[in-house]
Amino acid sequence: MLAIENRYPLLVNDLQGKIALVTGSSRGIGRAVALALAEAGANIVLNFRSRQTEAQTVESEIVRLQRCCVTIQADVSVGADVERLIRGAEESFGPVDILVNNAGIFRPQPVEQITERDWDELITANLKSCFLVTQAVLPGMRARQWGRIINLSS
């Protein structure tokens, strides 16, 4: 029995056969979400921008849970990368059923120290990425009349 059964008894196998894409899933909250979704029965599309080693470690953990997993590098704030990410997910497993928009950056700075360039980078990483990935998966979810989109922020 999986450890998640004690914490979330209604989730176990509820997501059997679903495809979940978690952006920014090489570490932190994204990693934890990807593992929880895998424990609940979903096959996982891991996404990372630059932390390949960490993403591969998460993939290994998911495979140990006997779930299917694919890891795809993409900067989700870039439209062409998002297209490649979704194409790779669909070629590997089929259409995305669950999207967790988790990728983002955080700079703990006083507002007076944030430059315009810093602000633009935050908006691009934290908001534009959610828009682009949601826009890419939403038509398929609507066509299938099923899907879940979860947006996280810190």
Image (spheres, grey):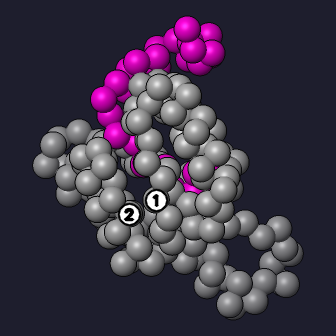
Residue drawn at (46%, 63%) of the image: 130
Q: Which mark is residue 147?
A: none
Query: Is 25 situated left or right of 131 in this image?
Result: right
Q: Position of residue 72 (x, y in %)?
A: 46, 59
Quadrant the C terminus occupies: bottom right
Whether 66 is drawn above or below 73: the answer is: above
Say if residue 2 shows up in the picture: yes
Q: CA distance from mark 2 to mark 1?
A: 6 Å
Earlier in the chain: of badge 2 and badge 1, it is 1
Residue 22 magenta-highlighted? yes
Q: Position of residue 136 (x, y in %)?
A: 30, 63
The answer to which of 56 and 5 lies nearer the viewer is: 56
Mark 2 belongs to which amino acid?
Answer: Leu
Outermost residue, left side: 143
Q: Which residue is mark 1?
A: 72
Q: Are marks 2 and 1 in contact (CB under 8 Å)?
A: yes
Q: Position of residue 78 (x, y in %)?
A: 45, 78
Q: Secondary structure at mark 2?
A: helix
Instruction: State the extent of the magenta-drawn residues as a range.
Output: 1-26
- Residue density around tag 2, few if under 14, some if 14–19, many if 20 or more, within 10 Å: many
Query: Is 48 situated left or right of 81 in this image?
Result: right
Q: Which residue is mark 2?
A: 85
Query: Is 42 situated left or right of 117 in this image?
Result: left
- Magenta stretch, main secondary structure class: loop
Query: Is 76 situated left or right of 93 in this image?
Result: right
Mark 1 belongs to which amino acid?
Answer: Ile
Whether 135 is drawn above or below 80: the answer is: above
The answer to which of 112 and 147 lies nearer the viewer is: 147
Residue 149 magenta-highlighted? no
